[in-house]
Structure formats: structure tokens, C-alpha cells
Image (cartoon, helix red, strand yellow):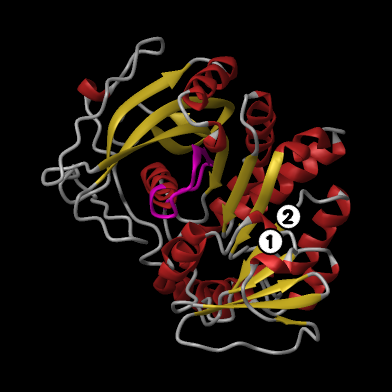
Amino acid sequence: MTLSRLSALLLLMFVLSGCGGRAVLGLDASGVVKANAAIPAPVLNDKTGPKAVIPVFVATSRERSDNLSLPYSAKRSPKLNFSRIDIGIPPTHKNGQVEKSSTKPNPARNFAATTFQPYDTGAVFVDRINAELAKRPANQRELFIFVHGYNNNFADSVFRAAQMSYDFGIPAVTVHYSWPSAGSLGLYVYDRDSATFGRDGLAETLRLAAKTKASKILLVGHSMGTFVVMEALRELAENGQTDVFRRMSGVMLAAPDIDIDVFQAQVADIGQLPKPFTVLVSRADRALNVSGRIVGGHPRVGDGSSIPMLQKLGIVVLDASDLDGGAHGVFASSPTLMNMARSGQLSERVLDGDERSAGQAVLADGTSVITGAASLVIYLPGRLLGVVR
């Protein structure tokens, strides 16, 4: 590794030092539920926690571990593992944050798992998801599938899935696909290889999701996890399984850490992308700027340098450069995005190009920039839609 590459890697480690962590779930034997047993109703308390419990259905290509605090390790599993983990949201929770602990978490202050139920097969996984869907009103029977990014151990990633589901008020059953990230800042290359390894597992997870009784499937990937998403979609397309795409209500890639040339090749292999297909970018994303330096200066899809190209591919682009700091994790932490999601401004109609739902001016030339203390610029294929605050 050259001195410049080493310097860039060290800078990346500094920039991302708050993105991952050594979180633990906080489980003990009392929280483990047998495969066919009923999940006990959570005990909620607005002082001692949790104030809410989010059930997260997990499919993972991580190896199973005997350590209940991290029931899945960083090792790569030759087969998918399945479970349900209920995550408690602490009463002191602040929107956009994951209040975690590297020691046994305190439910009054930290995200913590309340129950863990492993499943033996994908068929049981589908059956349990269907049972959860059946409890929901008809308009809340979607699946929200989240794929994490670089430097996440298992607890980090499942907590983030629960945080997004809770803070954004996502009216869906939460499913988390966890690929075997090392959860270590110094193992960027291991994570890149693991992202490639993890594509088959996500493709299988999507096939299983399409077998459920969910009305639609929303797929969201972050950072290096977006490479896993694109590779899984490519695998499905090349195997003639694009019927899975028709089950999707949308795909979002947040801060994608993918080489722009690789991304264009992936899109060409996929052919017709699921619609709407959305990419969130930011010129203020220091992590992606450093990632680009590590790989020799090649632009990343999420760094905001290739918006016109993305538009030509029929992709909706959310430019978060001026949105609540525009950092690498803004997709999950932005109060503005949360408000827009809850109010319906980021509805499927907006992302699919229906300007009538925006309530803001459409700028047809695609060159204007809307500024503000907290602003988001939405580029639709062929034009730009500005949404402020």
C-alpha cells in the first residue's frame, strides 16, 4: 500500500470512528425464545424502558455464535441463518441516534434486545413474517428490508434497522439482512470482500420476501451495503427472477460506496431497474471522499459527482449535500427527512415523478440549486424537483 493510500485509510478510520462501534445486544438466556414458542408481550415503561419494541426479522450470512450479546459473528456462513430479534427503544431516545453500549446495555438509556428467536429454515422465516403481517392493518402489510454498510457488527446493524423503522414511522414489518462485516475500522478490505460474499444471501432473502403475503417490499441499502444490493439485484436479473422486482415498492441506495463504472455495469446487467429507484448522494460526505482516495481517486456513486449520469439511467437522485450536515449517515439521522417521510412529502408518488404531490416548484432546466439551512434537492429523470425544509 502506498503512503497516500495508507494516509487515506487512516483518515477514513478517523472520519468513520463514530459510524460503527462495539455495540452488544444485551441478551441473556432468559431472552431466548424457542423456535415454535409464542413471543411474550413486551413490558413497556416510560421511565425504565423500553418505551417501544420493534420486532426485526433477520436473515444473515454471518455465522451463528454462542455469544448471546452478539449471536452472529463476523465470520462468513455458507448458509443463511434466520431469526427474530425484538429491539427495545429507550425512553431517552433522540430521533436519529442509536444509543448503544459496548457493555450490557441499560434499557432505560440504550437500545437493547428483549427477545431472540432463531428459525431453522427459510420456510419458517416466511411463515413467521406472514404471522406478523396478519396482525397489521391492510395498509401496513409491507416489508421494509434494510442492508447495513461498512464497519458494523451485528448489534450495530440490527439496532440501526430498528431505529429507522421507529424514527421514520415506517408502516411495515422490518426485515434486516446482515452480511458479515468485520465491524472493525481497519478491515475495510475484508468488508469489501464480505460484501461480495453477501450478495447470494441477499438474493435469497429477496426471493423469500417475495414468497410472503406482503403487499410490497421496500429495499434500503447503506454505504458498502448498496454494493450488496446491486449485486443481489444483478443475480436475480441474470437468473430470470425479475418477478421479484414487481413485488417492490422501491429501492433506495443511501450514500452508495460503489465505483461509478462498476455501478453502470451493474445497471446494464440488471436491465430494467425496480421502480422507483432512488439514490441519496452528498458532496459533504467525507467518508465517501476518503473511500474514493483509497481506491485511487475513482468517484463513488454517492459523492454527488455523477448526478446527470444517474438521471440518464432513470434514477431519482436525492441530493443531501445541504441537508442537516450531509454526513455519511444523514439518511438515518436527518430530522428533515424524518419529517418529510412522516408528512408524506417523500411519498412514492414524489419519488416516481408525480410532481403534483410535491407542493414545491419544479425546475425544468435541472440546473437550479435550492439552498437553505436544511434543504433537499430531488433530481427526477429529466428534471429537478426542489423540496425545502
- On the question of residue 278 being in view, the answer is no
> Who's the residue at 80% across and 69% down the image?
381
Q: Nearer the viewer, residue 42 or 344?
A: 344
Q: Which residues are magenta?
A: 166-183
> Who's the residue at 53% across and 15% down the image?
124
Residue 130 located within the stretch drawn in magenta = no
Residue 298, percent from left and from top? 71, 75
- Tell me the amino acid under the disc marked 2: Pro
Residue 276's tag is 2
> Who's the residue at 40% across and 45% down the image?
162
Residue bearing mark 1: 351
Please say if 37 is above or below 129: above
Secondary structure beneath dot 2 equals loop
Please say if 270 is above or below 303: above
Residue reaching furthest left?
47
Please say if 351 is above or below 108: below
Whether tag 2 and tag 1 are in contact, CB under 8 A, the answer is yes
- Tell me the amino acid under the disc marked 1: Leu
